[in-house]
Amino acid sequence: MENIMLAYYAAGAGIIALAFALFTLASVLKEDMGTPKMREISEAVHEGAMAFLNRQYKTLIPFALIIFVLLWGAQFFVEVKEGDHLPVGMPSAISFAVGAILSAVAGYIGMTSTTKANARTTEAARSHGLAKALNVSFRAGAVMGLSVAGLGLLGVSGLYIIFESPLIINSFAFGASAIAFFARIGGGIFTKAADVGADLVGKVEAGIPEDDPRNPAVIADNVGDNVGDTAGMGADLFESYAATTIAAMLIGNTLFGFTGVIFPLLVGAVGIIASILGTFFVRTTEDGNPQAALNVGLWTTNFLTAVGVYFIANSIFGELGIGFGVFMAVLAGLLVNVAIGYLTEVYTGTGKAAVNRIADASKSGPATNVIHGLAVGMESTLLPMLTFAGAIWFSFWAVGSAAPPEHAGLWAIYGIAMAAMGMLSTAGMVVAMDSFGPVADNAGGIAEMAELPPEVREKTDKLDAVGNTTAAIAKGFAIGSAALTALALFSAYVDGVKHKFHDVLPNGEFIVNLTEPMVLVGVFIGGAIPFLVGAQTMRAVGEAAFGMVEEVRRQFREIPGLLEGKPGVKADYARCVDIATRSAIAKMIAPGIVAVTSPVLVGFLLGAKALAGFLTGLTVTGVLLALFLSNAGGAWDNAKKWIEKGNIGGKGSDAHKAAVVGDTVGDPCKDTSGPAMNPLIKVAGTISLILGPLLTKL
Amino acid sequence: MENIMLAYYAAGAGIIALAFALFTLASVLKEDMGTPKMREISEAVHEGAMAFLNRQYKTLIPFALIIFVLLWGAQFFVEVKEGDHLPVGMPSAISFAVGAILSAVAGYIGMTSTTKANARTTEAARSHGLAKALNVSFRAGAVMGLSVAGLGLLGVSGLYIIFESPLIINSFAFGASAIAFFARIGGGIFTKAADVGADLVGKVEAGIPEDDPRNPAVIADNVGDNVGDTAGMGADLFESYAATTIAAMLIGNTLFGFTGVIFPLLVGAVGIIASILGTFFVRTTEDGNPQAALNVGLWTTNFLTAVGVYFIANSIFGELGIGFGVFMAVLAGLLVNVAIGYLTEVYTGTGKAAVNRIADASKSGPATNVIHGLAVGMESTLLPMLTFAGAIWFSFWAVGSAAPPEHAGLWAIYGIAMAAMGMLSTAGMVVAMDSFGPVADNAGGIAEMAELPPEVREKTDKLDAVGNTTAAIAKGFAIGSAALTALALFSAYVDGVKHKFHDVLPNGEFIVNLTEPMVLVGVFIGGAIPFLVGAQTMRAVGEAAFGMVEEVRRQFREIPGLLEGKPGVKADYARCVDIATRSAIAKMIAPGIVAVTSPVLVGFLLGAKALAGFLTGLTVTGVLLALFLSNAGGAWDNAKKWIEKGNIGGKGSDAHKAAVVGDTVGDPCKDTSGPAMNPLIKVAGTISLILGPLLTKL
């Protein structure tokens, strides 16, 4: 069965995805951009987004170089015995660099696609109608989706073909994580600073409508949609993809050798082909429902993936008797995806009981609105956590119960990695659906700014509404995949350090014993880190938004005729983009240092056992805070929208004012601090994978 | 060393404490109550508080009876072998009932003392001055403090003398926990409903001052101070006291036999005697600083306890060589107490950077105030968690490193229980300081309502300000002790179920293996429970407050002359008390059911290993949420007070209005949901102690 050709198939699937993405991008770029005004706005957004990416990646270069050198140089500080595979040295440093670079490349391709497609979507809506507009915007999203999945699979399988050891290439995941953490936080701060600046001064103080070209922060706001939802989410899922695949390969290697290594790559390949095929099913008619079209695409992808995995699992693991068990574990991952999306909707969907309760509470003022929003956020954690618990149990059981009794306990661990793989195999499609959102959102903004007739805006608004739903699904997917990825990383970490633990059980199982003080110490410290990062990021948004508010006020004050809309007077959009960029980049550093150094400190100061406890504490509270913050924010947002639709007094009522307070509190929760939790728990896991074998050498 | 007389000494110390409490109560009751008006108000508060306690305990009787019968009857459903000690049957049922009843008795004694001392404190301030007022109010608090500690120690040692097995009497802790959970939540809902009702309609809508006798909710508000801070906190710490002592005895029994069982009782006895002596050091002069007087009392208690424990530890554990190690572990507990009090002050103290930042953020409106408050709350978790982690590590190390190498790993577990004992041994003094607060607060209210000259109110305000600080210290103490108690309970639980685990290590250590799916499943479910209870309790306050607001509005509307203050027109105070009581009692049920049934469901459906994971997840997120919610609430409160002192625009400014929103959001956080976390994590632990041995029989 040791057939390295199979790795080439996986790499081939990655190349196909990438080729498909680039081909789709070319086809999107052929679409018409509309009027000169539309083209001008679109280019401003594109330039702003690229300026942000350039600055962000440039800031990260020294940081990445330090880690590159450390990874390379660490081999001279640890004693390496013959036959030892250590995750340090030249190959690891190279893998790290490739992970970081591919994450950036995916970001650039995706951002180019979405920021160049916005005016083209507006134009499609204007000249052709809804069906064509969906077509353009979804294709733009698909470029991002398939770049993420394609580069992820190509990177992992390519490096495996070269270095032939999952241990050596696990720095690839670390490279991807490090970038993802900064991309998520930087993007999150940027988008909320611009949003608050545009809303608070433009809408509230100056009383001009959303997306009005007089507002100096309007371009920054549109850039923010892209750097937050597209670049941030893309980097996040690229990381999950890379980390899960490598964790699964590491565990698979210990348990089954080559068979266990190659299978995750093949699951990835199946998922990618299924995602490509799925994109062809996303089409609608003029009066059709775009949401239904996207759902058909997603379900097709899920179904094709399941079928493909069924055959591959049986062919690879059939001999060992666990083919069906492995398939069931992968299926569990696909189902978690569906369940989390559904639960997100229950707690944050417009018109749902939870959201209505917040809207009702707005009648007695902002305080009760906030209290009920916090309550909804807290409550919303239980069912997703039970879902994860169910997936953990089921995936272990599915593999363990099919395995021969003497291997049951050990082999079962492969199950959780397979559930994570199952969930992530469809990342291409999920990212495509998510990235389509900002394109539709921007398209509406361009329709407004270019003063197109209202029926264009109506069509883009229809797409935008769908985009909000797909964004919620993607958020749930990101949290769910982060949770499963973290568990897979945890298993792989423990597997890597097991000979360090004096208490390996007779049957070969290794243990992280919660009654040992160091493990508990790690759990307590790890549990507090997400709260610290949450605090840092919330405060960062507040401070960045403050700078933005000052700048918008200044422009209205100092540029004569701007507020009145005098022809020829233009706001200094670029300066707003620049301010948001600067503060986002400056403020992503501190949480980044916490995320990267805390596992290193715990590992070196307190040891490998404490690090295992640390990962557990960090994962549990990280996932809980991600759910709490994202869902509270989503529910506040939709409670406000519900009132704006004319319920409970409607726009301008006291209840509406109270709901605006809740929505503003929710903004950094749902778009900055909440999403920051996903890369936080994963980056700790990927660092630990590298630290683990080093700790056992000390 | 098997000298049962030592247990009689402990019981004797409990009786001394109780006698001292009753003697002090009698002396307090001899003080003058002042004018008929003062007496009348005081009696209304007393009656309201008693009515609440009566209704609350009456509601809990059927619930307690069910558990009583289940505990008694369970012996017929499990196979009991010769020599088995199981925590079921008649002795366990009786222990449970004794725990529940003594918790209630402590509540009645303490509430009688504080509600009867309020007018006497006012009168002391009026006729004698500050020194005497401190003397009366602190003695009233000491009654509660020494009742809690005395009944706790007497109950545990008395039951141990009768049944001679710590396993059998551990239902005593369960009885105490069950009552504590309801007392905390019921009291928390009552106090906030009354507070919000009084403030929102009285102060904000009708524009009458705080504690104005025209306000129909004013008596309920004063009752709330007592049922929240005195009864709730007292029950909480009674539970910690009982649970920690029994957990320490259980672990001690396994490790050292009788020696290990008797030592915790003797530590308790030392702490009680030290607390009694400490109360004599609380005296101040007319221009003295009451805070300094209380600090002298606390430090004296800490010092005497440390000295006493040093000698006892050496005499009991000297032979085993771990006398000094055990002493150090106890000392660590005392130090955690000091550290947590200090950290609470750093994050919530008026004039501190964290609070000022929230006050500053109020300038840009309620949303930024709330965001910064959430950030402070989140941030405030890290250092306390590091403190707990340090205490865990140190107390294990202190005992483990002194032990003979072959016992090191196992004996070290006694360390954490000793740290918890150390912290709780001074509970008598801490509860005394905490309970003094509501007396001073009520005394001020009575001065206002009885229209005494302003210099009386000035004196009581001075005491009240000190009461706010001691309340913050006690809150930190309650969280810290809950965390250490939960860890001790966890250790005792694992000890109790270890033969269930097939993987007991060769050296006799027992393991809860985080890489096993069921343990992880438990961690995930346990982690979500505090979020659920947090949501339930926050919402309960909102709903109860709503009912209160309606009633106060109704009285102003329907009672002619009330708002104008026409002589002879009186508000219907009793009805407000009744409404707060009803809704508090009704709304404590749902979270109570979650708290009590979730560990039972996890234990029976998923097994003993899942329950161990459940306790870990629950403890970590419970402690984190307790810190987050309590500190955020405290910081919001003091940010508002800071502005009211004339900073950042002062009272009535927009910043002040924003700060009021934050304070209102913080109210249920700091006085209901946050404090609910302590009994939540302990009740799960005490139930598990009973379930554990049953699960191993299934």
Image: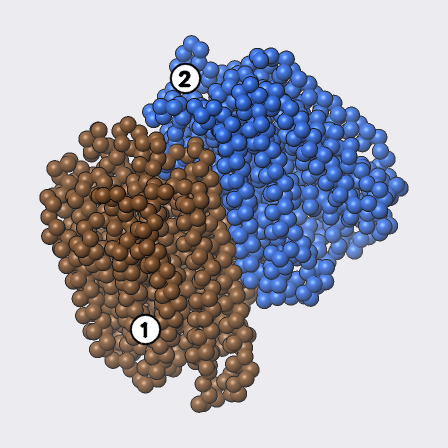
Chain colours: A brown, B blue
Tell me residue A365's x, y (percent): 58, 59
Query: Residue at (55%, 18%) from the top-left corner?
Result: B319
Using the image, name the chain to which the residue with label 1 belongs. A
Residue A362: give its label.
none
Q: Amino acid at mark 1?
A: Thr
Label 2: few (<14), some or many (≥20) within 10 Å?
few
Where does label 2 land, which residue? B77
Residue A131, above or below B250: below
Q: Nearer the viewer, residue B11 or A437?
A: B11
Q: Which residue is mark 1?
A: A115
Looking at the image, is B45 positioned above or below residue A244?
Answer: above
Query: Could you tell me the amino acid type at mark 2?
Result: Phe
Residue name at image x 21 percent, y 29 percent: A405
Asked where in the image residue A617 lies, by quadrant, the reply is top left
Residue B567 visible to an observer of this rendering = no
Chain letter, disc 2 residue? B
Circle nearer the viewer, 2 or 1: 1
| Residue for point 68% across, 58% down | B642
Q: Quadrant of residue A22?
A: bottom left
Tags 2 and 1 on a common chain: no
Q: Is residue A92 visible?
A: yes
Answer with left or right where residue B486 lies relative to residue B498. Answer: right
